Image (spheres, rainbow, N blue to C red):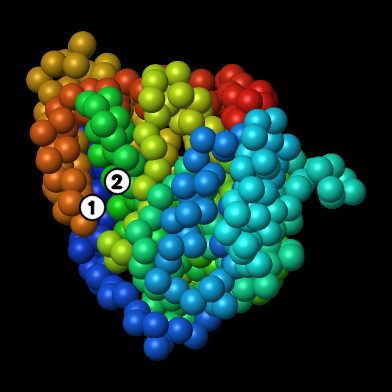
Amino acid sequence: MITAGLLLTAFYVLLIGIYAISWMMIPIKSTAKSGSLRHTYTILIPVRNEEQVIEKCLSDIFRQHFPASNFEVIVVNDYSTDETVFRVTNFIRDNQLPNLRLLHMADLPAKQQLKKAAITHGVSVANGQYIILTDADCERGEDWLSAIDAMVADTRAKMIYAPVVFKSNNIFEHVQAMEFAGLVGIGAAAIRLNNPNMCSAANLVFEKQTFFEVDGYKGNEEVVSGDDEYLLHKVCKRYPGRVHFLKNKDAIVSTSANASLAQLAEQRKRWVSKSTKYENRFITAILIAAYLFNAIIVAALFTEPAYGMAMLLAKMSIEGVFLFLVLGFFSKRHYLLLLPFAELFHILYVLIIGVLANTSTYNWKGRKIN
């Protein structure tokens, strides 16, 4: 076990070190001025039971420093059972917005449901050259669209992963925010290395034509999650070098951290449930190696405490360096004070969720998913 632990430790330190260097090599982008607009956008928001947040989301979008003629917003209602539809309808009426549409999954002949079907439906009727996926619980600044347009104009990208950060108000949420920032950094660094692994549909941009060129979600429709990552892998495979991370603070969207352990568990089970279904087996191999690394650390702490502590300190040190870099971009370096506690929490929940995600069901938006 010790030999395996040392080998996995060396592998992990090397991997995160490579990601740290790659993150530093991603250039910081500036935001375009209104005179440089070149593209049209459809902002696509799939919703299910979002009555508490949808109006704030739409208000943020329609306060953009961006001409209304250059973008539209499509809200796709996935069988909401609360007042989401009522609030969107009132928002359209009260603000007289011709570039805001509300679609209903229930109107489709096949009675489809779930997020991938909602996105596919929205893309099929979109007028914009580029699609921007976001979530109803996301907030953004007034130059968000301008920052995205500047990146599109500069790179002619087929897909852009833009930054996402967790809002947090207590230690539990701060730990989640720090971990999620690390995941964003890893996703960005992997894209820079042209070997993408993860992204987030909370802030994802892609060319409409490209979506159909790669057949959208065909081939992974049965997997409930992965509406972001599966598409990322397809686009990068077809257009290597044409997928980018947008390192611009104006492009950041913020979303809420989970308020409880139960919510965190359900979210992470949904995320991890697709880990064995990637076409790129290198990604699955890395995830398995990371899982084994965490498992060996725990086992060694009980059987060979000196080796276990050495592996834990190596893990915490390289992750601390990486997080120092990434959290600097998000202006959240103070979260690093929680790193020792976060490390222990992260190891335990990774081991537990890794098992549960592949052996049990989970709930998503009031639906039980097998």
User: In the rendered structure, which amino acid carries the disc numbered 1?
Assistant: Phe
* Relative side of 312 to 12, left or right: left
Q: Which residue is mark 1?
A: 330
Where residue 273 sits, quadrant-wise, is top right
Q: Quadrant of the N terminus?
A: top left
Q: CA distance from mark 1 to mark 2?
A: 8 Å
> At x 20% / y 12%, what residue is drawn?
303
Q: Residues within 10 Å of mark 1 (few under 14, many from 20)?
A: some
Left or right: where 334 falls relative to 251: left
Q: Nearer the viewer, residue 33 or 88?
A: 88
- Looking at the rendered structure, the number of numbered marks drawn on it comes to 2
Tell me which amino acid carries mark 2.
Answer: Ala
Which residue occupies 54% across, 44% down? 54
- The local secondary structure at tag 1 comes to loop
Q: Quadrant of the C terminus?
A: top right
Nearest the eye: 105 or 69: 69
**Which residue matches tag 2?**
181
